[in-house]
Amino acid sequence: MEKLNTRFILKTKQKVIQSQTIQIRRGIFQGDSLSPLLFCIALIPLTNKLNRGDCGYQVHGTERKISHLLYMDTLKLLGRNDNDLKNEMEIVQTISKDINMKFGSEKCARICLKRVSVQSKMHIGSTFENDIKELDPRKAYKCLGIEENFDMQHKNEKEKLKKEYLRLKLVLGTELNAKNKIQAIGSLAVPVLRYSFGIINWHQEKLQKLDRKTRKLLTIHGQHHPKPAVDRLYVPRKQGGRGLIQLEAAHAVEITKLAEYVDRKEDPLIHVVRTHLHNTDSAVLQTARCLKTEVQRETRKIKESIAEKTKEIWYGKRMNG
């Protein structure tokens, strides 16, 4: 690390300004694109050690064990019993010390499940283990933006997501023009819900209600006529529409893509997910298959197909005046 150096280069129309050589004495600059890659490389010994250990949740009907789920700085440990979890935590503590990484135990929690019921356990072990609190059965923990406990809290999560989605009121209250307000809704409000599609159970009626709420707010803020051609609102601007993203259509595209990914991916963990979804007759898979049958096109063309159908309905309406 001490031998690394860099330069800052600023290009203008007239000339190129270049700084002197800057020695990197420790770490890398915050926001550097190399930072997440180096972080993942540093955690490779941790995930390898956990995979080699004889710990983890035994997948029903297979010999595979799942000891942990890791995504960037989010780690979830899984064990068959307390001994498994204790061994995994010791591995995490050892590797963390080896790579000089501080483990944020204050952000962690543990939960013990037996036959889908939460059981409280006494912490008897190292200080590191005792620092990790027991999760309150009435509360949830957030993993990758979704709150969980012993199961997905679908109802509570939907209410929170709906409130967060209504941040579009802030967008509509700005002095942006109509085009930029529609674009801001698509980049700030819609992704809040889109991230949860395929994870949280969204019914078409709920999404249609949110679409109606969105149109109502647009009308209140003077961005939409009280008696308009609704379909034109969701047609792309290049084709004469206004380019608003319809939540119902976005949901159809996302779950169809997710279902195809799960069906085609050969990763061992994805295979476990695929088996579980087929055995439980997942509502997401059923909806995705119905959509593909209805559209009768490849997944990558479903978005274009829905947009084309909306445009045809709008074009087919009678013109008055």
Image (cartoon, rainbow, N blue to C red):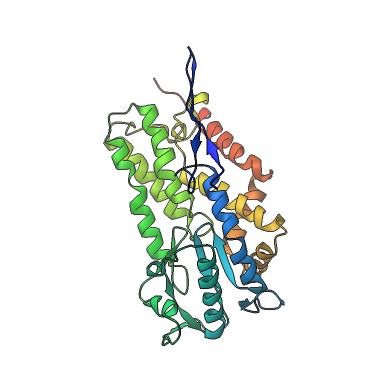
Residue that extends furthest to the top in the rendered view of this protein: 14
**How many numbered marks are there?**
0
Above or below 10: residue 199: below
Q: Quadrant of residue 175?
A: top left
Looking at the image, which residue is at 61% across and 51% down? Answer: 256
**89, 296: nearer the viewer:** 89
Residue 126 appears anywhere in the view: yes
**155, 195: nearer the viewer:** 195
Q: Quadrant of the C terminus?
A: top left
Residue 134 appears anywhere in the view: no
Looking at the image, which residue is at 47% across and 75% down? Answer: 150
Across and down, in percent, residue 172 comes to 30, 36
Whether residue 173 sits left or right of residue 83 in the image: it is left
**184, 51: nearer the viewer:** 51
**222, 102: nearer the viewer:** 102
Looking at the image, which residue is at 48% across and 57% down? Answer: 203
Whether residue 13 sits left or right of residue 179 in the image: it is right
Whether residue 222 sits left or right of residue 282 in the image: it is left
Looking at the image, which residue is at 72% across and 77% down? Answer: 63
Q: Quadrant of residue 181?
A: top left
Across and down, in percent, residue 215 comes to 36, 40
Across and down, in percent, residue 284 comes to 57, 59
Across and down, in percent, residue 102 comes to 44, 64
